[in-house]
Amino acid sequence: MSAHRWLAAAAAIWLLATGCGRQDTSTGRSAGSDDAGAPVFRVLATSDLRDALPLQEMVEKATGVKLRFTFGGTMESTEAVLAGKADADAAWFANARYLLSDAQGQSRVKLQEKIALSPIAVGVSESAANQLHWTDPAIADRLTWKDIAAAAKAGKLTYALSNPATSNQGFMALMGVVAATSQKAEALTAADVDRRAIADFIKGYKLPGDNSSDLSEQFIAQQGTRVNAFINYESWLLSLNASGRLREKLTLIYPREGVSTADYPLLLLNDARRADYLKVVDYLKSEPAQLWLARQTLRRPIKPELAARVSELPSHTGLRVELPFSTDRALADGLIDAYLNEFRTPIASTFVLDTSGSMAGATRRGQLVQAIHYIAGADNSLTGRIAKLTSREKLWLLPFADQPRQRTAFTVPAGSPPARGVQSVADSKAKQQVLAEVRDYADGLRMTGGTALYDAVYLALVEMLEEQKKNPDYRYSVVAFTDGENNQGRGLARFKADYAALPEDVRGIPVFMVLYGEAREADLKALVATTGGKVFDARNTPLYRVFRDIRSYQ
Amino acid sequence: MSKTAKILVTLLLLVVFAGSLALAWREQRATAESRPPGAASTPLEGVIAVDVEPFFQDERVRKILAAHRLPVQVLRMGSRDMPGKVATGTPPDFLFASGVVAANEIVETARKANIAVTQVAPFHTPLVVASWEPIAGILVANGLAAPMQPRVYSLNMAGLTETMLAKKRWRDLRQANAYEVSRAVLVSTTDVRRSNSAAMYLALTGYALTGEIIDNRATARATAARLAELFKRQGFQENYVNGNFDDYVAIGIGKAPLAFIYENQLVSHAMTKKGISADMALLYPKPTIVNKVVFVATNERAKALGELLASNAELQGIAIDHGFRTADTDRFVNAVKPTGLAVQPRIVDVVDPPSAGVMAEMIDVVSKEMTQ
């Protein structure tokens, strides 16, 4: 018997003997019966690995291990693993450097094995690449993140990128700019950040998002109008090129000396499942799984000799010199803080809040108040700081019932950035004051009357349009929350007609709809199909977490 | 390390590993109880470094051990985590660590826990630097390496250490066209806080800097303080044993122009792949350290296993098939020959790592520097 099989047998006997696995009680598995006895092997994967979902079946077929994925954002998942709250036997991340540069993180990970590779690249629409002369390999091979930032500043490069505060791609793109513009070759610190270069780079950041699937759809819709480039893992860019859905193909640029490669480590978290973990790893690194990953998801096999056999992957991409990952937490935290509070286009949004009678119960009202407290709170954890109102942000709260009520405006004051570099700064008195006002407002919400959802959303959009005319340097959006069907004011058809009559600029203002209580999913989806945006389901997820998710789309 | 710190570290290790130990033990007991009557003798339970895992998975090894009534049940774990298994007071039958640094820690922990142990080093392998032909060419042009065989070079450790401490970048070197990048000249290692090979790198650069085997704490601290930057400036380091070599093979020259590894990693890679890719190069540091793979037994049966591993010609031959060296140099050289990798038959210029206490002192200094 091989060591793996012995371990599997030992684990199975142990499980039978004790009746349940350490963390498996929640799966409700009964000991003794054959199939039901095999516990699920739960893998928390980052959302960019969604395209690898078919592996679930392939793994089970090849190894008998009942692998089940759940997906989460990079930062959120990292935080869960750090805190020991991942509720999974293993984690599969695009990369785990942030997690593993921390002693606490290291102690959570029992074993790790890299499964595939995909470097981050800048995919530029061919026409834009031609204008920039980036289609010439002699020029393309020498481009650095500094050149990317310069093109962004000049308005020649407008790009889609997932949120630097919540995603690895976004964060590493910023780090690429930091490294290319600092004077040092390595061991960068928060003081080495060239603030001007970051600001230049951000000028081209026109399409934010939180996960690659959504952002790809947005990119397809807006390529050539709002954006001409997409910064993402090579695998996603190649997949888009192969999809036939783009207006024009993307030319992939791998910034010189600034490539960050996702290496997809599979991390064992629950030592009791070591045997299953080893089986899964063996399979994922086997030729069939590697070739499947390469051909179907366009990630590079971890074994170079297999990579050479996959014609779908680019054969020549120049000398890709890896960007060293700084383990300096002050730099990482300072950069994310500075991005959110200083560099990013500030958020201006209206929260349309259902305050109809059905919201009056303690649970519903309580959840809404808690969610508003959360975004106006003092949570400085990885995820908390993303949800939290940022410096310079404008917020309007617009409650509605039978009709829209009075809206209230809040403006978070700007901080005072350091002259050099970046650093995490405590909230100023003035900022704390505004946050307290938002919380007080939530406490005072009264719930009574009907649900004039479309009237309220329409009004919010009209008001955002007006604000945008006055202050174009913000990123506008509407967040609408409802727990029931529209029963007052205009209906969906009338809303659509009125929306169509609004000035063209309104199409740049997405509506993020929160589905709650008895709200009708189909109605909300229809609304979002008209306005652009996304529906977030809060029926089985705490409302505050949904608000947090929305924040990374704003 | 101060006495208090040592106690704290020990306590920490205890807490971290007690759980997994208890679990592993329950598993193993369960198997033992469920074994049908008449099966072979009770397996020896061992924890092993990843380097020797393929050896124990080898069917031939299983057969030989069974024939000698010394079958094993092994669990892979990091060598530097192994002392935690001993600190519990109920250690496994044997611990097979990847090198002397970890072995010394295991023996020291056992001594404190009043557990009698014996050690034997059945195989060994020198520390080498895995690199690339274009990089080797640049090193030769700058007097930092000298060709020995096709794709095999000797590496001038004193010169390289000086170059690295001078914060030279690749593009600062002469004839650096093939790798004209602003990346600093640095050898990539695994995390010194976790791995044996990184500790060997610290020992080797320490020797390069001082020209002697460091034998006192004052010099150890001063030297380690100067060398800490060679680790710190690497940024994120892989903290599992194969991480560094994996990056070398999978990502290549852009990530790991110079990777500090055990020779057996490259040799077994070459044996599995029937050769190495055309641009890979093998650099022998001059001088280098020969790493002993140390088997620590906590009882008589396990001691017999250790002796068998060290003396049985067949087992020694199989170890060679997995890239290790044994006393039989000719057999090693002949086994590697078909891969085209021109390994150095006898490693001549060799130094010993400093004593366990001095080494611990140096690791402590660098570790503290890294966490700042």
Image: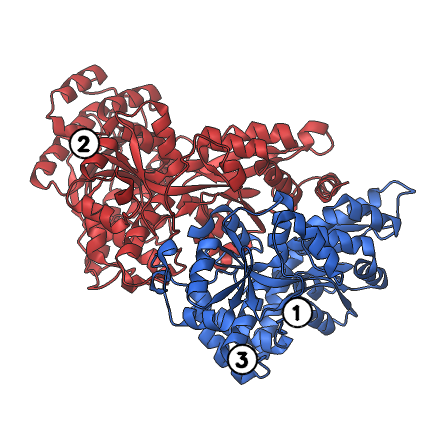
Chain colours: A red, B blue
Q: CA distance from mark 3 to mark 1?
A: 26 Å
Per the image, label 1 sits on a secondary structure element best described as helix
- Residue A5, can we see it? yes
Q: Is residue A155 left or right of residue B213?
A: left
Quick check: A534 above or below B266? above
Q: Is residue B75 left or right of residue A538?
A: right
Q: CA distance from mark 2 to mark 3?
A: 67 Å
Residue A508's label in the rendered image is 2
Identify the residue at image location x=11%, y=37%. Answer: A468
Residue on which disc 1 sits: B105
Quick check: A535 above or below B212? above
Residue B138 percent location from the top left of the image: 42, 60
Per the image, label 3 sits on a secondary structure element best described as loop
Q: The C terminus of chain A lies in which quarter of the figure?
A: top left
Q: Is residue A424 left or right of residue A493?
A: right
Quick check: A144 above or below A251? below
Residue A482 percent location from the top left of the image: 29, 29
Q: Mark 3 or 1 closer to N-term?
A: 1
Per the image, label 2 sits on a secondary structure element best described as helix
Residue on which disc 3 sits: B211
* Quadrant in the rendering for residue A337: bottom left
Q: How many marks?
A: 3
Residue B323 percent location from the top left of the image: 67, 54
**Residue mark closest to the camera, 1 vs 2:** 1
Please name whichever residue, B160 or A149, is drawn nearer the observer in this view of the structure: B160
| Amino acid residing under circle 2 | Gly
Q: Residue furthest top?
A: A493
| In the rendered image, residues at marks 1 and 2 fall on the same chain | no
